Amino acid sequence: MTGKSVMTKPFALIVEDDPKLGRIFVVALGQVGFETALDEDGSHYKHLLETRTPSLILLDVHLPFASGAEILDMIRSDKRWQNIPVVVMTADIAMSKALAKKADFSLLKPISVMRIQEIASKIFSELQQD
């Protein structure tokens, strides 16, 4: 035994209302070592945040029960979550530009799975260094 603590898997919260994309993101993040929770309509994100603090949030902007922009504002204004890396995802170029300063990454849909994995891997590496 080396005395090092065992690193638990990082946790990612995915807020995405397209079921197919949501499942793709779950698999993609799982492949780079993340556990995930998926909120498929924007109605459960707050409960999921309260239950387990994520290391990464993938956030769709247009959701049936919430505004991604409002969720991002709430995350950034809460001391518990304000430093969590947030990837904002939208097909709306103007919205992407508007949220780019608040989000850590702002990606235009369609989004490459490899790009999501690249971002998640970078965050995972940073977590291991802390």
Image (cartoon, rainbow, N blue to C red):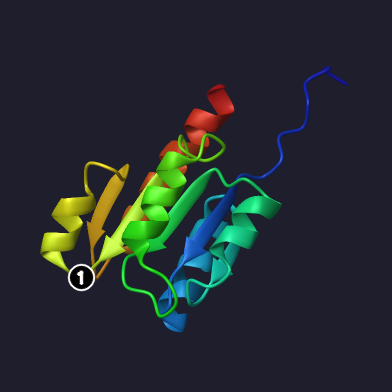
Q: Residue at x 31, y 45 (%)?
A: 103
Residue found at the very far top of the displayed protein: 3
Percent from the top left, x then y, of residue 22? 47, 73
Q: Which residue is mark 1?
A: 91
Percent from the top left, x then y, of residue 69? 32, 58
Q: Nearer the viewer, residue 86 or 28?
A: 86
Q: Is residue 79 left or right of residue 100?
A: right
Q: Residue at x 53, y 73 (%)?
A: 43
In the rendered image, is residue 110 in sight?
A: yes
Q: Quadrant of residue 85?
A: top left
Sort mark 1 into few (<14), some (14-19) or many (20+) by Cα contacts within 10 Å.
some
Percent from the top left, x then y, of residue 9? 66, 45
Q: Is residue 22 left or right of residue 92?
A: right
- Say what amino acid the circle numbered 1 marks: Ala
Q: Residue at x 48, y 29 (%)?
A: 126
Percent from the top left, x then y, of residue 2? 82, 18
